[in-house]
Amino acid sequence: MKKLWVIVVLLVACKTESQMEPDSPSDTGPKYETYGYAGFTREEKQAYSKHLLEGGSRRYGGDHSRFYFLHFSELEKHSRILRSDTPKTLEETPREDIKNFLTPMNLKTGGGLPLTEYIQQAEVDGLIIVHKGQIVFEGYPRMLPTDFHVNYSVTKIYVSTSIAILENRGLIDTSQPIDTYLQDLKDSDWEGIPIVDILAMSSGIDPASSNQLFRSAYTGREQIKALSTAKAVKPSGTAYEYRGINTSMLTLLVEEISGLTFSDFLEQEIWRKIGSEYNGLLGKRSNGIAATSGYGMSSTLRDLARFGLAFTPSGRKNANPIISDAHLARIRDVNEKLKAKSWYSEDMKCPGYQWDEIYEDGDFYKGGHAGQGLYISPLRDLVIAFYGTYDTNKQEHQLPAISRQLAKSRLFDLE
């Protein structure tokens, strides 16, 4: 036990090698708010590390969960995703009108508060808003700006973006059935299911019968064969059912078509190209599978915002943008059969390309477990990214609803 404590102290006293970085590009006078946050105390670090390393749950909510979210690299297997050689500088032009934006009155917690006060009261770890390529609001009430934070299901967008990159190169046609490219799915319930339905979480496949086989599969071929045992419970394209098996299948498709591991593809084709300032960390399950349908990526909030910028006019100015016009068009080309009322507003929404909500004005949003999120408005050249932790009652903040209200507030209308 004494040796365990030595390991614990070493783990929590410093960053792991995979998260160490050279000095980041210097900025003069950062304008973000930290609201006096100073991180966990030494005693808290030791207690939480001991709890987790001895097999304690990370799902208590509050600081127990937040410690896990911020110390992922010390607690889980992962691959390092190398940063860009030329990090993208984000100019800071904070705006008081956004800082003082009044949140909707009908929120469960903090309704009617100025935005800067709301994120201190709710379980928000960090929030960044980027308009026309410039940071107009940035606050860190429960994390440090350089902290790595687990993305959870926001990671699914890295998978769908990878699919779109391969599609732009003519290597995949998402209107075709998945078994066109993964031959081991022939004669399974996946046969004939268009990739676009898998992207929209409407494959109709129930993962229950394949879970155990998938967890014990190591090679890509074994993983595909394991997923091939899953059974369809309804025709594809007829119902939205949020299931990680869809993302797992798409991850394997990227690996099959590209000939790369997903972590290598992500690094080469996305992470290094968005101008990331820090390395990313991609979680791996015990059998080595990239955890794209689980805890997924861990990154700084600014680097998540840099990824979001790739979908906006400001981030698509170069000659070969990561996100093409065709990709944006395909995101908006929704399956009307899946249209439903938004979870966060009175708007109607559809799922597609792994985004949770695609709105009729062309905005789209992806959320992740316990309060992670990425909201994109190409029309307004707007990115809103945030991290959070649910409280001990498993209640999350309401930034998804606030993001939609912000986008529609006219604060970001372009001249």
Image: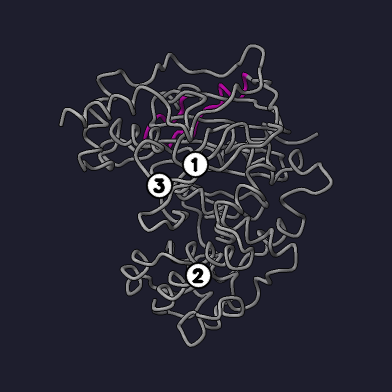
| Residue 298 image offset from top left, x and y in percent | 48, 40
- Residue mark closest to the camera, 2 vs 1: 1
The span picked out in magenta is 96-113
Crowding at dot 2, Cα within 10 Å, few <14 / some 14-19 / many 20+, comes out as many
Residue 148, position in %: x, y? 47, 33
- In the rendered image, which quarter is residue 234 located in? bottom left
Type of amino acid under label 2: Ser
* Residue at the image position 66 percent from the left and 17 percent from the top: 27
Earlier residue among tags 2 and 1: 2
Task: For the residues labelled 2 and 3, say whether their Cβ atoms are less than 8 Å apart.
Answer: no
Q: Secondary structure at mark 1?
A: strand
Q: Can you identify the residue that label 3 sits on?
A: 369
Disc 1 residue crowd, few under 14, some 14–19, many 20+, Cα 10 Å: many
Q: Which residue is most to the right?
A: 319
Which three-letter amino acid code belongs to the residue tagged 3? His
4 to the left or right of 255: left
| In the rendered image, the vertical position of residue 264 relative to residue 13, given as above or below | below
Q: CA distance from mark 1 to mark 3?
A: 17 Å
Numbered disc 3: secondary structure: loop
Decide which of tag 1 and tag 3 comes sooner along the chain. 1
Residue 102 visible: yes
Residue 327 lies left or right of residue 393; in this view the side is right
In the rendered image, which residue does mark 2 sit on?
Answer: 202
Q: Which mark is residue 14?
A: none
Image quadrant in which the C terminus is located: top right
* 407 and 280: which is toward the camera: 280
- Quadrant of the image occupied by residue 265: bottom right
Q: Is residue 179 magenta?
A: no
Furthest toward the bottom, the residue is 187
User: Residue beneath label 1, please?
Assistant: 281
